[in-house]
Amino acid sequence: MQTKIGYFASLEQYRPMDALEQAVRAEKIGFDSVWADDHFHPWYHENAQSAQAWAWMGAALQATKRVFMSTCITCPILRYNPAIVAQTFATLRQMYPKRVGVAVGAGEAMNEVPVTGKWPSVTERQEMTVEAVQVMRKLWESDEPVTFKGKYFVLDKAFLYTKPEDKTVPLYFSGMGPKGAKLAGMYGDHLMTVAADPATLKNVTIPKFEEGAREAGKDPSKMEHAMLIWYSVDPDPDKAVEGNRFWAGCLVPSMFKYKVYDPKEVQLHANLVHCDTIKENYICATDAEGLIKGIERFKEAGIDHFCLGNSSPNVNYGIDIFKEVIPAVTE
């Protein structure tokens, strides 16, 4: 599958208008896609933002002409009702044909707990996500009102009058562990994962995704392996590393394992992450060659659609340098 290079317009890190300007700039440089984080709380406290992704996407789609656009990632089970998620992305997909997708996952405590007070087990949240996807697809596809009574969600003669193009929205399903990756293959159109050890991606995550796809009667060769990873580029190597500090909390396992939802607490943990750990897990480069090497490392593991979060000290430089990078990693 042809490698695609996407730009992650971080609504947690940048003011929404700044992120929109980045999206426009990224399209002009040659990025294939733009992704928006669908968060309520951010992964850092200081100098953070938290714009609503769907509102931002409507503006960004109108401001651009070509790029595919999706959230990364929407949790359709707690603070959002899956029927409303279905309606939102059906609307966007009808208005901007072939340019809109949605990525779904079982959520993070920082987004769900503050506004619902709920945080079910990961197993239950995965079950809820699968059922939510079923609800969304039924609403997109059905020519008749839908009545559905699941374990978690109910539809009572619900009908989407505004249908998406082709009665579907490309759905990226989040899969990080083996179980999540298999569920992604079974219920998603494509895989969305996050930066991990390339060997794990190659030997566990992607095989499990493809196993799930085959069990569901799908052709894995037609399904993307997308991955979110942050990068920072600066001639000063230390500045390049520290540029990614904003996202260091994602490297702390307890942030996912426990009900941590206060960005101040997340930041305390992020600031304790060693520079070497950031360098090992994210792309920290001093030039285009360093970015190319960082991308190729994951491309060799089987990733074919990159969702690249720009944490460079000079954000515009971090976009413009891809004039050199994109041809090198896609040809």
Image (cartoon, rainbow, N blue to C red):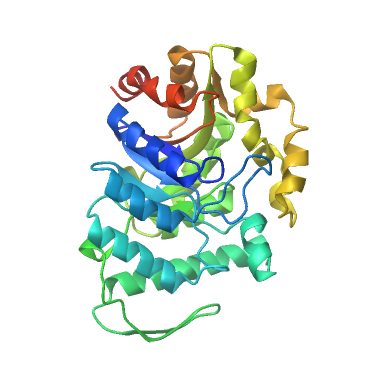
Q: Quadrant of the N terminus?
A: top left
> Dividing the picture into quarters, in which one does residue 204 lie?
top right
Residue 242 locus on image (x, y percent): 65, 24
Residue 125 locus on image (x, y percent): 60, 65
The mark tally for this picture is 0
- Left or right for 102, reference 61: right
Residue 96 locus on image (x, y percent): 24, 55
Q: Is residue 173 above or below residue 150?
A: above
- Left or right for 32, reference 280: left
Residue 250 locus on image (x, y percent): 65, 41
Taking the spot 33% from the left edge, 55% from the top edge, the residue there is 170
Taking the spot 38% from the left edge, 22% from the top edge, the residue there is 320
> Dividing the picture into quarters, in which one does residue 165 lie?
bottom left
Residue 198 shows in the view: yes
Q: Is residue 233 above or below residue 41?
A: above
Is 272 in front, or is 208? 272
- Left or right for 230, reference 264: left
Q: Quadrant of the C terminus?
A: top left
Residue 210 shows in the view: no
Q: Is residue 206 above or below residue 310?
A: below
> Dividing the picture into quarters, in which one does residue 151 lie?
bottom right
Is 160 in front, or is 126? 160
